[in-house]
């Protein structure tokens, strides 16, 4: 019997390292967390045309996502209903039907079983009820072009699941009326650590940036003015400290200065010029407060495993057992951005937080080092500390969610409180959602 | 097969081969200053993403894809500065690296000043106490013949075999 209350303190500040390496806990996570969370599947721009498809994972399960003729997206387990081979082995494409390579069962893009070999007297004697053998469907809902899947029919709607976090999501995925675009396919990278270790870093870890990435940051900042906004300085006050926010386990660390995201880029002036040319449009579309988010230094994620650092990387961490995961990384840009900057953004992403990134290599090394100790017996009994700023969180009148200054463990605590709720609850309706608040000063 | 016009002498082939072996040794030794001297100012260093699609797939390649490297000299300089100054968070202790270069084909690539050089690299790396990693790739290079008879690397396209990178990072240069 796994006692979750002994693994995560009620405030989320103290977490047993057993949750980063224990096989039984991992198995329970597949059921309790990945079986009931809204998991990112695709952005609408990855599947622009009817019958475009891509293959991905929900938890450790292979999934296929297909654009239907009516424009909607459907998702299915990517497994033949007959004996289980992976139905589609291509990572993306366009197809009217999918034929299982083993016995030749043919499924349509709607998931229906269309045809089986030897259906008549030479085999099935017309006794196979094809209508009962369609691909296993997955519940799909979308918000601002992002499609998510959920294995649990009883889970709340995606809209309720995101709750007040939508206020922040809008600024990331709909900064302008034309929205954003996912460029190309993902970079993929295996890593020897638990999926939560790779996730929590981008969800909430402002603290590590200069200790882990100091060298890379100094090299990229050489000869430039300004900063990311999170440099160590105990004299900072108010807005300069930025904000950490948590809502329903989703989190974000952000500033509203409009400039921190691109200061590390090669031609900083070009980016500043672009942001300057759009600022009025951001403000018109998002209001004066959120209109400053595009171009600001931001990190965050949607519980449990979809995350972003706008201007750098957008990613999902797929679990692969308790001690391994696979990072999928996309480049996301505003659709209205000039083509030249889109090209530059892809290159900057690779150079900073991509597989070969100047910064990414530091993170991967640290995550592996966590795995080195948490999987050993004595190490697994130690407690990880997420108590920075504990007790300082507040509900501000002008921002949704529970907030504190950015350099705090606010987002981690929200994440692990949420994880514990999912792990304990018998059914989705037992997992409470943060009550939406009307935020008068938000705009 | 190369045509008569493209064919290089055995001596030139030998010199190019020695240059590739020398280059591999510089990188194995983490001699990034030495490696930089082999690079042309108009360098394009490219390691594209490898995709897994059905052969019959009609859908075109991505117009822009998330490649592992797509660097000119200025961005390569940033990478070399980073690699030259290891931090204990990642590159210190240094991994131990060996590059084996084979299947070398050399031909004149359209002019007598530029050589098209195809090769295969087998890259082996061991990190920390026991982290063994490797990757294989086909390389398509363009090397320029300098007035002093030396070569400089103008273009390199590295076709790695891995889609999902099975090494902890792609920081080692191929």
Image: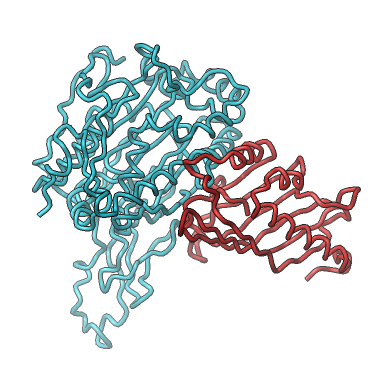
Q: Colour of chain B?
A: red
- Residue A108 appearing in the image: yes
Q: Which chain is cyan?
A: A
**Image coordinates for residue A23, horizontal then vertical, percent:** 23, 58
* Nearest the eye: B73 or B148: B148
From this view, report whether residue A178 is shown above or below residue A439. Answer: below
Q: Name the image colouring.
A: by chain
**Image coordinates for residue A101, horizontal then vertical, percent:** 38, 74
From this view, report whether residue A411 is shown above or below residue A104. Answer: above
Q: At x 70% / y 58%, what residue is drawn?
A: B140
Q: At x 24% / y 27%, what residue is drawn?
A: A164
From this view, report whether residue A131 is shown above or below residue A278. Answer: below
- Toward the front, the furthest residue is A378
Left or right: residue B14 versus residue A26 is right
- Residue A401 appearing in the image: no
Left or right: residue B104 versus residue A66 is right
Q: At x 57% / y 61%, what residue is drawn?
A: B124
**Image coordinates for residue B23, horizontal then vertical, percent:** 72, 54
Q: At x 15% / y 33%, what residue is drawn?
A: A433
Quadrant of the drawing holding the C terminus of chain A:
top left
């Amino acid at each position: 019997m796994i006692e979750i209350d002994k693994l995560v303190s009620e405030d989320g500040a103290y977490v047993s390292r057993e949750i980063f390496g224990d096989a039984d806990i991992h198995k329970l996570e597949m059921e309790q967390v990945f079986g009931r969370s809204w998991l990112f599947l695709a952005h609408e721009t990855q599947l622009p045309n009817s019958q475009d498809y891509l293959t991905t994972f929900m938890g450790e399960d292979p999934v296929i996502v297909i654009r239907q003729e009516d424009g909607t997206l459907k998702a299915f387990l990517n497994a033949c209903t007959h004996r289980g081979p992976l139905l589609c082995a291509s990572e993306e494409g366009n197809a009217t039907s999918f034929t299982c390579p083993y016995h030749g069962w043919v499924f349509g893009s709607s998931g229906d079983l269309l045809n089986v070999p030897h259906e008549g007297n030479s085999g099935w004697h017309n006794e196979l009820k094809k209508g009962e053998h369609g691909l296993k469907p997955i519940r799909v809902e979308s918000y601002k072009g992002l499609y998510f899947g959920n294995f649990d029919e009883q889970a709340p709607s995606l809209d309720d699941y995101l709750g007040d976090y939508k206020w922040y999501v809008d600024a990331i995925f709909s900064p302008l009326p034309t929205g954003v675009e996912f460029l190309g396919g993902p970079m993929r990278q295996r890593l020897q650590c638990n999926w939560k270790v790779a996730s929590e870093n981008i969800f909430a870890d402002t603290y590590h940036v200069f200790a882990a990435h100091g060298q890379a940051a100094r090299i990229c900042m050489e000869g430039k003015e300004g900063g990311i906004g999170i440099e160590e300085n105990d004299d900072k006050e108010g807005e300069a400290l930025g904000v950490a926010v948590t809502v329903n386990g989703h989190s974000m660390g952000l500033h509203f200065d409009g400039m921190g995201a691109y200061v590390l880029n090669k031609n900083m002036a070009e980016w500043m010029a672009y942001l300057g040319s759009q600022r009025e449009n951001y403000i018109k579309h998002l209001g004066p407060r959120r209109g400053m988010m595009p171009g600001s230094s931001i990190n965050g994620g949607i519980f449990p495993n979809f995350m972003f650092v706008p201007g750098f990387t957008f990613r999902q961490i797929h679990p692969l057992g308790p001690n391994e995961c696979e990072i999928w990384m996309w480049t996301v840009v505003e659709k209205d951005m000039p083509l030249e900057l889109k090209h530059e953004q892809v290159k900057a992403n690779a150079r900073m937080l991509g597989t070969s990134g100047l910064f990414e290599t530091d993170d991967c090394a640290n995550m592996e080092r966590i795995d080195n100790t948490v999987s050993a017996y004595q190490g697994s009994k130690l407690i990880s500390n997420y108590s920075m700023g504990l007790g300082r969180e507040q509900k501000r009148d002008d921002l949704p969610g529970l907030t504190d200054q950015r350099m705090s463990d606010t987002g981690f605590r929200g994440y692990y409180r949420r994880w514990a709720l999912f792990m304990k609850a018998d059914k989705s309706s037992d997992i409470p959602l943060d009550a939406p608040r009307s935020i008068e000063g938000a705009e | 097969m190369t045509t008569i016009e493209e064919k290089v002498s055995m001596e030139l082939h030998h010199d190019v081969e020695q240059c590739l072996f020398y280059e591999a040794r510089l990188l194995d030794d983490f001699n990034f200053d030495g490696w930089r001297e082999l690079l042309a100012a108009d360098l394009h260093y490219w390691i594209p993403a490898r995709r897994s699609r059905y052969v019959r797939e009609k859908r075109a390649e991505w117009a822009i894809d998330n490649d592992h490297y797509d660097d000119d000299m200025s961005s390569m300089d940033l990478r070399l500065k980073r690699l030259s100054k290891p931090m204990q968070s990642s590159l210190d202790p240094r991994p131990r690296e060996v590059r084996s270069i084979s299947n070398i084909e050399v031909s004149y690539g359209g002019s007598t000043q530029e050589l098209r050089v195809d090769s295969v690299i087998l890259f082996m790396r061991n990190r920390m106490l026991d982290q063994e990693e490797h990757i294989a790739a086909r390389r398509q290079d363009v090397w320029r013949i300098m007035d002093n008879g030396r070569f400089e690397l103008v273009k390199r396209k590295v076709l790695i075999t891995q889609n999902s990178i099975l090494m902890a990072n792609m920081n080692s240069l191929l």
